[in-house]
Image (spheres, grey):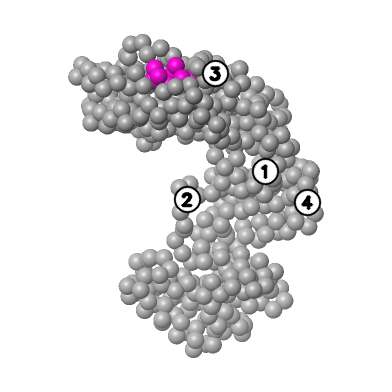
Amino acid sequence: MDLDQLRAYDQAGYRTLEALTHVRAPRQSTHSSPHAFICTGGRTYWVKRSAQHGLVVELVAARLGAALKVAPTAEVVDVSPAAAPEDGAANHLLGVGVGIEDRGGFNPRELTEFQNEGQVYAPGVVRAEARAAVIVFQTWVGAEDSQVLIDPTTGGVLSIDHGACLPEAPGGVQVVVTDIPGVPATLGKDAPQSALEVVSQVEAFSDDAILRVFAGVPDAPEWNSAAERRLRMAESLSHRKARVREVISVWLQS
Amino acid sequence: MATELARQQHRGFYSLLRWRSDATRDEPRNVAVLLIDEATDFGELRAAPISALSPRLHEQGLLDAMLAGLNDRMRQAPPAREFLVRLHDALEENLVATEPRPVAVADPHAVLDDLYRAFLARRGGGGRPMTQGVVLDRVVNAYRKQGRDVHRGRYVGDFIFHAVLDPDSAPQPIEVLSFGAARKDWTPVERDAGHFLFAVEQLQLRGRAVIQPPSDEGDELASATHMRVRRWLDSREVPIQHPDELLDVQLAL
């Protein structure tokens, strides 16, 4: 991996979708306060214009997660004033941000409220293999403040909110198990084959493939996407890739 | 960093039309999207296939008539946002319209396509089996594109027909049948054809039939029923067309 190669890949540019119309605000307020917009192509995306470590992290991590089928797809989305609601509620999202495809479902915070209010949520529906796959991914990318999306009808689990991951220095690789209300932390260990399949998919990412995922990113201040920084993150991710099997194997046997 | 398209976008408005077959149960489903763009004098409605909205012929007819009328109204004089506001206020029963919402428009046709995909298109894509309802959708659309006055699920006297051409002047009933989708029991199709023949005889009208032939030559029951029904129609000198023939006429026009 080198800077010249990354810049060469940057030349291919990136696709931008345009927001067409506002759908809704988030059910709960969060740091980035994403809102849902229907965008060109007819799909709905949750658009953010801020992330803890820069929008580049949110976009790249989602690209990786989508490739492993453990996260919703992400796109660069341009929100113009014509698409924003007339009450100004989404004005903080005007400009070019990251759109995460809407997949429905609930995050753990919402599920906790479901349980607190006495509404029925069946934790037993969460599928072990889906949880295991997300654990492998979030471990690889070094997710901090990790979040997941649960589909209570299928038991599917997806990794979301990737604003704090992809460290610039490799550091230690620790297993990341995101808490899901009512679901034991051990769920996922009983799906070792699924976990190790995803580990194999992680290992199959070549350095060139990793570098390409980091290419083609907007370069405004909120993106924090200087090429040198992206290269450091890519190199760190490659290094972490080599440690994931060991860490996950230990976790599976613990 | 804004895209060229984003720089061209201006504000239009859209509303969704929703159909609820039972106003008490209030279980609406999206049936059409209306888009207004005053800057380009654009006003159009895009509806989901009627056969996907209700299995009941009479209900299909009501819905089709309402949507066709609304579409004509929008094409005659592209309305402004106020039209959507009045529509929202006026429709309260089985058909309701959402309040107009802002939408960014550069190319209104492309935006209408995207709104249709977002609110109406079938998830998962793929073609629909050629059921009688789907064939009827094609037949009605083909006649409308030819500029014909066609009504779906319309009564003439005491008898309901799949479609009727020129119902108010010189009604011509149309029987639409499909053998193109698998089914276990073909006798309802025979009864349907029998009803049509009885009805046109009682009304002393000349009808016509549009028939989708069997797609699976190995389905003996479908083939046998198809041939039986064709014999009945031939014996009464009812002209029979393949749905594609209607499209050929449309292309020729």
Q: Would you say the residues marked 1 and 4 are in contact, meaning their CB atoms lie under 8 Å apart?
A: no
C-alpha distance separating marks 3 and 2: 39 Å
Residue mark closest to the camera, 3 vs 1:
3
In the rendered structure, which disc, 2 or 1, sits on the residue that comes first in sequence? 1
The answer to which quarter of the image holds residue A142 is top left
Residue A157 in the image: x percent, y percent?
37, 29
The residue that mark 2 highlights is B125
Whether discs 2 and 1 lie on one chain: the answer is yes
Mark 1 or 4, closer to the camera: 4
Chain of the residue on which disc 4 is drawn: B
Residue beneath label 1, please? B15
Residue at horizontal 19 percent and vertical 19 percent from the top: A253
- Mark 1 lies on a secondary structure that is strand
Q: Chain of mark 2?
A: B
**Which residue occupies the foreground of this view, B76 or A219?**
A219
Camera-side residue of B27 and B213: B213
Q: Left or right: where does residue B51 sit relative to residue B168? A: left
Q: Is residue B108 magenta?
A: no
Q: What is the spatial separation of the Cα atoms under label 3 and label 4, in whole angstroms? A: 49 Å
Badge 3: chain ID = A
Q: Which mark is residue B78?
A: 4
Q: Who's the residue at 54% across and 18% down the image? A: A226
